[in-house]
Image (tube, rainbow, N blue to C red):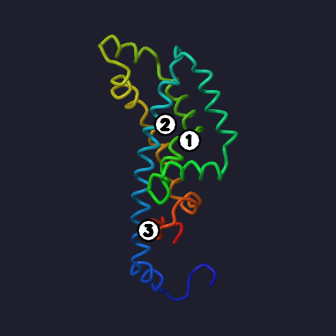
Amino acid sequence: VFLWPKGWNLAAYRTVFTDRTILRSFGFTCLLTVIYTAVTMVMTILCAYPLSKRNLKGRTAVLMMITFTMYFSGGTIPSYLLVSDLKMLNTIWALILPGAVNTFNMIVMKSFFTSIPDSLEESAVIDGAGHLRTLVSVILPLSMPIIATLSLFYAVARWNMFSDALYYINDPKMYPLQLK
């Protein structure tokens, strides 16, 4: 076989589509990816928007603490102990919440929010909008490119993760596709 396969064989596909455990894992992985992407985008937006405001008190200190976590993490054992103490072992939340905010992606989104002109927010405030209304009605519609990009990054990252499921999930019914 060089460029063209010799003889077509669909036996592997037949085996995969008749195995119920693989189909269940595939469905669970799709559900997990959708929920993870939604939760992480909400958390990233809610973290990045306030930090993009220049008049936020303690902004520099909070950014330094968040950036510190990008370079130094607690490690695998403390993460496992935390998930265990929070009674999240063998739950879907053990695969979602520990990675709910990616520091690098949050900084990228904060930088994007900072690049939006202040005059747009000021006009919303003059019209009587509060911070949440300004975020939902003005900032988020302008931020669709960064939201789409980071959503894709989060979805692909969740789809490819397997080590967290290996650590936190012991029930074979909750195995994602990567552990099958």
- Judging depth in this view, the residue of 148 and 18 nearest the camera is 18
Relative to 6, residue 85 above or below: above
Corner quadrant of residue 31: bottom left
Image point (49%, 47%), residue name: 97
Image x and y of residue 162, in percent: 56, 61
| Kind of residue at disc 2 | Thr
Relative to 141, residue 130 above or below: above
Circle 1 sits on which residue?
102
- Judging depth in this view, the residue of 16 and 149 nearest the camera is 16
Circle 3 sits on which residue?
25
The mark nearer the N terminus, 2 or 3, is 3
Decide: few, some or many residues near mark 2? Use Cα within 10 Å; few <14, some 14-19, many ≥20.
many
> Label 1's element?
loop
Circle 2 sits on which residue?
44
Relative to 47, residue 172 above or below: below
In the picture, measured across the screen, residue 125 lies left or right of residue 153, that is left
In the picture, measured across the screen, residue 3 lies left or right of residue 150, that is right
The mark nearer the N terminus, 1 or 3, is 3
| Kind of residue at disc 1 | Asn
Q: Which residue sits furthest top?
A: 126
> Label 3's element?
helix
How much space separates mark 2 and mark 3, taking CA atoms?
A: 27 Å
Q: Are marks 2 and 1 in contact (CB under 8 Å)?
A: yes
How much space separates mark 1 and mark 3, taking CA atoms?
A: 25 Å
Split into 4 quadrants, where in the image is the N terminus? Answer: bottom right
The mark nearer the N terminus, 2 or 1, is 2
